[in-house]
Image (cartoon, rainbow, N blue to C red):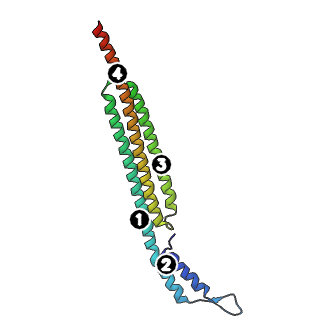
Amino acid sequence: MANTNTDILLEDLEDVLDDATSIPLSKKYAVDIDKIKTIIEDIRLNTPQEIKQAKAIVNSRNTILDEAKNEAAEIIKKAQEEAREMIARDEITKTAQAEAAEIISKANEQGKQMVTESQNQASEILSNATTQANEMVTSAQNKSREILAAVNNYADDTLLSIDDALYKALTDVRRIRQGISSVQNKD
């Protein structure tokens, strides 16, 4: 963990106190008042900058979380739209439609869980923001990418499952229709 300017200034203040001269026959020490006042003023000047850095980190984290939520919602919405279009093409696929609704419901639940988990992790990271500012930005960005990749992978898997189910259902329907046609042609 890198030292902040305030950490360095506090170390300087400790050094001034360590260099203090004891006053004989008392428990008191003589210190360089000017050095201490200078260090305190520098701490006051540095503190607003570190607060600004912490706020910037918080804002960056919130932006990353919002983008991850929006992208996850968009992926789920697109998966739902594509599933509805595929199912609506043939009325005989009602069974496939029920399975698709269940898959989409699970996708929504898992997407919400991922967003909740990312918010919980982001809150934990935020509590350490003032001392781990640079590390927190990197960690939040990496976690956001992982969540987005997981949501994308899950959406792709869901669409492939729906596609397979529809393909099987349509194959069965074609086979049944072909059987009906061949029975009708025999008559």
Q: Amino acid at mark 2?
A: Ile
Q: Give left or right: position of 5 versus 166.
A: right
| Mark 3 and mark 2: Cα distance apart in space | 38 Å
Residue that protrudes farthest toward the top in the picture: 187
Residue drawn at x 52%, y 89% as measured from the top left: 34
Q: Which residue is mark 3?
A: 116
**Residue 75 % position (x, y):** 36, 44
Q: Residues within 10 Å of mark 2 (few under 14, many from 20)?
A: some
Question: Mark 3 or 2 closer to N-term?
Answer: 2
Question: Mark 2 or 1 closer to N-term?
Answer: 2
| Mark 1 and mark 3: Cα distance apart in space | 22 Å
Q: Amino acid at mark 4?
A: Val
Image quadrant for the C terminus? Answer: top left
Q: Residues within 10 Å of mark 4 (few under 14, many from 20)?
A: some
Question: Mark 1 or 3 closer to N-term?
Answer: 1
Residue 43: assigned label: 2
Question: Which numbered disc, 3 or 4, marks the residue closer to the eye?
Answer: 4
Residue that protrudes farthest toward the right in the picture: 25
| Mark 3 and mark 4: Cα distance apart in space | 42 Å
Q: In this rendering, is residue 24 above or below 124?
A: below
Q: Which residue is mark 1?
A: 56
Tag 4 secondary structure: helix
Q: Which residue is mark 4?
A: 173
**Residue 152 % position (x, y):** 39, 45
Q: How many marks?
A: 4
